[in-house]
Amino acid sequence: MLSCSAVAQRTFSVKKLPPIPDADGFAGSLAGVSNGALVVAGGSNFPNGGRPWRGDTKKWYDRILVLESPDGQWKEAGKLPFPLGYAVTVSWKDAVVCVGGSNEKGHVAAAFLMRWKKQQIGFEPLPAFPHPIANACGALVGNVLYVAGGLEKPDATQTLRQFYALDLAAPNRTWQPLPVWEGAGRMLSVAAGSGNRFFLFSGTDLVQDKTTGTASRVYLTDAHVFDISKKQWTRLPDMPHPTVAAVGPALVRDGQVVIFGGDTGEYASQTQVLKDNHPGFSTDILALPLPAGPWMIRQKFPAVIRPDAASNPNASTYLPVTTPLVPWKGGFVMPGGEARPGTRTPGVLWFK
């Protein structure tokens, strides 16, 4: 059990739950809660310890796993309709909502509800997103799912600057376009929803080189809030640093938004040099007191990077990216994710 001091003299503890039953683990999994059980599905990895800088091929999965209690064991629970990762996923009522995502064939527009009931997984289709989309962010406000940004196809040289809503409780569900924030398009952003507001933080834009045609990432620190009643965006104070691909949706608790880690871009240009010696992503826990800040780095997440981390990453505790943050059993779960570039983790962290 790891612990550290927290906001307003509180503390939180971090516990390791049974790991995902895969030696490599997965990033970009779909995850949420259905009828009290934690459901984790799909995602991608480089099988058998593969790495992108060695030319190994990324693989996507359709496997569905269920954990019914924090001290239980993972159950195999069937398969997704197709391999899938990097979708927008949230928990709603008794279902896990899944929108978009990607696989070996490209990005998809499909959307569906996934339910664990009577010891089996069932699916309910939702209206497809207006076009293929992956690496977007989303959050619920009441019964309405809001989705922002993303990427339309794997080789796109522009990120999406768009904002849509889907009322999950409506008798005739349809995607509704909404006004867009003032700022760059983005992917791998962090969203949050609370009260009558949707929040949008950080992410990365793409800029295309006019000579080579290749696109490079621009790490963003801007933050925005959308007033749902007024249908109006407001710019919030800029963040201390980017939080690209941080676990999400972010927490809104005790009058503040709290974001865990993320990729700051500090080592982005050194991935091919550092390889397995990459130190991992940020361990900063950022907090934005509402309504308007200022931002603060409240504390560090208690990551434990052991001396053998390069060759044995699963023995260390990283604060992952590219995985959902799932409220469950009075706490919050980070199921797997990316421990460092090219390296997934089967570790499942649960904190209160």
Image (spheres, grey):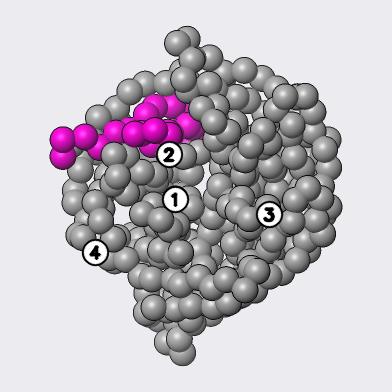
Pointers 2 and 3 in contact (C-beta within 8 Å): no
Residue for badge 4: 71
| Secondary element type, mark 3 | strand
Q: Residue at x 25, y 37 (%)?
A: 116
Q: Which residue is mark 1?
A: 326
Q: Position of residue 74 (x, y in %)?
A: 22, 56
Q: Give the CA separation, mark 3 to mark 4.
A: 31 Å
- The answer to whether the residues at label 1 and label 3 have Cβ atoms under 8 Å apart is no
Image check: 140 left or right of 346?
right
Label 1, label 3: how many angstroms apart (C-alpha)? 18 Å
Q: Disc 2 to disc 4, how far (Cα)? A: 21 Å
Q: Quadrant of the N terminus?
A: bottom left
Q: Tell me: 219 left or right of 308.
A: right
As measured in the structure, the alpha-carbon distance from the residue carrying label 1 to the one carrying label 4 is: 17 Å
- Please report whichever mark, 3 or 4, sits nearer to the chain's N-terminal start: 4
Task: For mark 2, give the secondary structure.
Answer: strand
- Which of the numbered marks, if any, corresponds to residue 91? 2
Which residue is most to the top? 172
SS at badge 4: loop
Between 104 and 302, which is closer to the camera in this rendering? 302
Residue of label 3: 256
Q: Is residue 295 above or below residue 15?
A: above
**Pointers 1 and 4 in contact (C-beta within 8 Å):** no
- Kind of residue indicated by mark 1: Val
Please tell me which residue is depicted at 61% across the width and 50% down the height of the picture.
252
In the rendered structure, which disc, 2 or 3, sits on the residue that comes first in sequence? 2
Three-letter amino acid code at the position of disc 4 = Asp
For marks 2 and 1, give the CA distance.
8 Å
Judge whether residue 50 can be spotted in this image. Answer: no
**Discs 2/3, front:** 3
Span of residues in magenta:
92-119
